[in-house]
Image (tube, grey):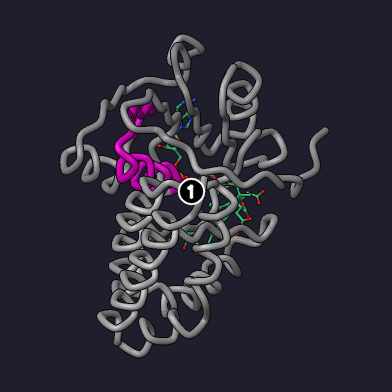
Amino acid sequence: MLNKTNFHYPAMLRVTGKNCVIIGGGAVAARKLATLLNAEANVTVVAPLFCDEVQKLASAQGCTLIKDYYKPEYLQNAFVVIAATDNKAVNRQISEAAPCLVNNITEPELSNFTVPSAISEGDITIALATGGMPAFTRLLKKQLEHILTPELADFNSFLLLQREAVKNIESTPQERTQFWRSVLKQDLLNLVIAGKAAQAKEKVLDAVNSFRTQSQNRPR
Ligand SMILES: C[C@@]1(CC(=O)O)C2=NC(=C\c3[nH]c(c(CCC(=O)O)c3CC(=O)O)Cc3[nH]c(c(CC(=O)O)c3CCC(=O)O)/C=C3\N/C(=C\2)[C@@H](CCC(=O)O)[C@]3(C)CC(=O)O)/[C@H]1CCC(=O)O
Ligand SMILES: NC(=O)c1ccc[n+]([C@@H]2O[C@H](COP(=O)([O-])OP(=O)(O)OC[C@H]3O[C@@H](n4cnc5c(N)ncnc54)[C@H](O)[C@@H]3O)[C@@H](O)[C@H]2O)c1
């Protein structure tokens, strides 16, 4: 049997438009529904009874609610399945029947993935897991929320654009790696944190321009 804590391969999933099925409609199902809907998944929730939060999310963000007990047919064509009933035996059946990514909320060891705690700001995401100590995960997340500011996310958006510009400069992947490592140093981060993002951006633009000039002058 799988160890309860051996979830050692972090990954970010693209669930946009993908069929994701949650069996169970209680408090935990509502939490998993919220994150799947935020990730723009196409979600179906199956349960005889839906809690207020699930109903609220369904009408605010749109998902399919099927008022029924679990049946294997509900797993057809699913990319992600969450076994989120309060019945261990049912969740176990779901875990066994799901030929895809499956998360079991009552017996994590029957899952092939676990849901980390996550904070996002713009395109930056910090995902966090503790190997099954969720209340501590929640506390650590609060600590990290202070670090992940809108200013950092804005600076990251700027960098993403510059990265595309740098890719269009004739250079080798090694040269680009070397370039970004030399530009993205602690002093630059300190400027952004100190509220001087404009200065930091200026420095990056200067560096990109001299990389371009160097590339043009380099014999190939
Ligand atoms: C991160 C988060 C994401 C989410 O679920 O959305 C999440 N649990 C959260 C909260 C939370 N969960 C529980 C409590 C009550 C306190 C407590 O019991 O400890 C609290 C705290 C609260 O609500 O304050 C109870 C609980 N959790 C699990 C079991 C079953 C078991 O352990 O056997 C039981 C029932 C135990 C029982 O019956 O007694 C199992 C798992 N919960 C995980 C994730 C995975 C491990 C992630 C990691 O390694 O950190 C894992 C392994 C599987 C999974 O679900 O993927 C979310 C944080 C939200 C946030 O970010 O603030
Ligand atoms: N993984 C986690 O993060 C986590 C967190 C807290 C609790 N838990 C565990 O998860 C269990 C559920 O917690 P909850 O707060 O969501 O419970 P809940 O009582 O709020 O919800 C249970 C839901 O399961 C549905 N259900 C029951 N039998 C079903 C079936 N055969 N088919 C479809 N739906 C069915 C119910 O209608 C209800 O909607 C708890 O018993 C606890 O052990 C896990």
SS class, disc 1: loop
- Residue 141, position in %: x, y? 50, 69
As rendered, which of 78 and 149 lies closer to the eye? 149
Q: Residue 36 colored magenta?
A: yes
- Residue 138, position in %: x, y? 52, 67
For image coordinates 35% across by 62% down, the residue present is 159
- Residue 186, position in %: x, y? 52, 81
On screen, residue 179 versus residue 43, left or right, reads: right
Residue lying at the far left of the rendered structure: 60
Q: Could you tell me how many numbered marks the image carries?
A: 1
> Ligand 1: does it lie within 8 Å of the C-beta at label 1?
no
As rendered, which of 71 and 11 lies closer to the eye? 11
- For the N terminus, the image quarter is top right
- Residue 84, position in %: x, y? 50, 36
Q: Residue 120, relative to residue 90: is it above or below?
A: below
Q: Residue 19, relative to residue 49: is it above or below?
A: above
The residue carrying pointer 1 sits among few (fewer than 14), some (14 to 19) or many (20 or more) residues within 10 Å by Cα, namely: some
Q: Residue 197 colored magenta?
A: no
Q: Say which quarter of the image contains residue 3.
A: top right
Q: Residue 58, relative to residue 116: is it above or below?
A: above
On screen, residue 186 versus residue 30, left or right, reads: right
| Span shown in magenta | 28-49
| Residue type highlighted by circle 1 | Ser
For image coordinates 66% across by 42% down, the residue present is 108
Q: Say which quarter of the image contains residue 147.
A: bottom left
For image coordinates 35% across by 55% down, the residue present is 160
For image coordinates 50% across by 63% down, the residue present is 180
In the rendered image, which residue does mark 1 sit on?
171
